Amino acid sequence: RAIVVDAPASAAAKIKAGLASPARVLDEKKDTWEGKAALRLDIGFEEQLGGGPLRLITDKIYLVGAGAAAATTSSKGGNPQGRMAIVIDDCGYDLNAADRMTALPAKLTFAVLPYRTYSGQSLSFALQRGKEAILHLPMEPLDASQASEATTISPSMTDAEIQQITRQALDSLPGVIGVNNHQGSRATGDERTMRAVLSVLRSRGLFFIDSHTQSKTLGYQTAANMGVSTAINNMFMDNSSDVETIKGKMRQAAAL
């Protein structure tokens, strides 16, 4: 965001003083905003991960002087309007992981599987700590034998069966504000199946995030065509358990 002020340095000092721990200004540097000279504050947190530092920038504030002249160089700060959503999938398997991750001082979204041992408690952790929670809806993968959940939406089902399973899964996790698909490479490639799921979401005012588990998914486009608020996953960050690899993925996501 950009703020026009009389004295950028003075405004920066006030912002620093007003930040609540553990948030702080991680970097302060000269930059430009729409051709005008600005003082940029990168605000966020520093954590330790795998024995090394990890910086999480939550806000970039450009303090633009009221009388600033147009700068001759373009901004090197990228698109300040960029946004990244991080979704933590598969909540419900491990209560300790849900407890630790929902306690992180970051705006994460938690996708909770229905009917798992710790589904309800994981959801409670997220909601009690002010996090967004969505339903991680099990859907049939390309190899049906690889389906990890007992109740999984399949293209072989009727519309009524698909809608009933979707409604029951949502009812089991009160307080979720949207849905993304768990597995589902076969189901998300079938328009009829997706229309049946999305009709329930539309009736409840919920959004849909296409997990993008296969290149020919129709989930995102079908949702858009039906007027359901939607987005599509651009990157999986944890295909490896190596900490440095995941850090690299996070940097790639930030650049994107």
Image: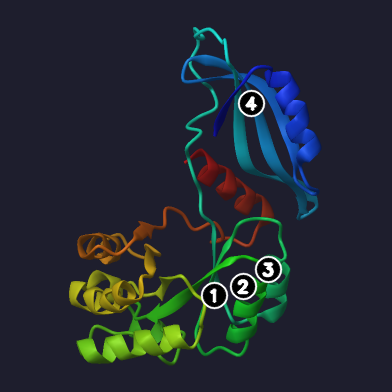
Q: Quadrant of the N terminus?
A: top right
Mark 4 or mark 2: which comes first in sequence? Answer: 4
**Does the rendering let one see residue 152?**
no
Question: In the figure, residue 185 lies in which quadrant?
Answer: bottom left
Q: CA distance from mark 1 to mark 2?
A: 16 Å
Q: Which of 63/91 is in front?
A: 63
Looking at the picture, how far across and down is residue 244, in whole percent?
67, 50
Task: Tell me the amino acid under the disc marked 4.
Answer: Arg
Task: Tell me the amino acid under the disc marked 1.
Answer: Asp
Question: In the figure, residue 200 lies in which quadrant?
Answer: bottom left
Mark 1 or mark 2: which comes first in sequence? Answer: 1
* Whether residue 237 is situated above or below residue 91 in the rendered picture: above
Q: The residue tagged with tag 1: helix, strand or loop?
A: strand
Question: In the figure, residue 118 lies in which quadrant?
Answer: bottom right
* Whether residue 248 is situated above or below residue 104 in the rendered picture: above
Residue under label 4:
40
Mark 3 or mark 4: which comes first in sequence? Answer: 4
Category of crowding for the residue at label 3, using alpha-carbon neighbours closer than 10 angstroms: few (below 14), some (14–19), many (at least 20)? few
Q: CA distance from mark 3 to mark 4?
A: 30 Å
Task: Tell me the amino acid under the disc marked 3.
Answer: Arg
Which numbered marker is on residue 129? 3
Q: CA distance from mark 3 to mark 2?
A: 5 Å
Residue under label 2:
127
Q: CA distance from mark 4 to mark 2?
A: 33 Å
Q: The residue tagged with tag 3: helix, strand or loop?
A: loop
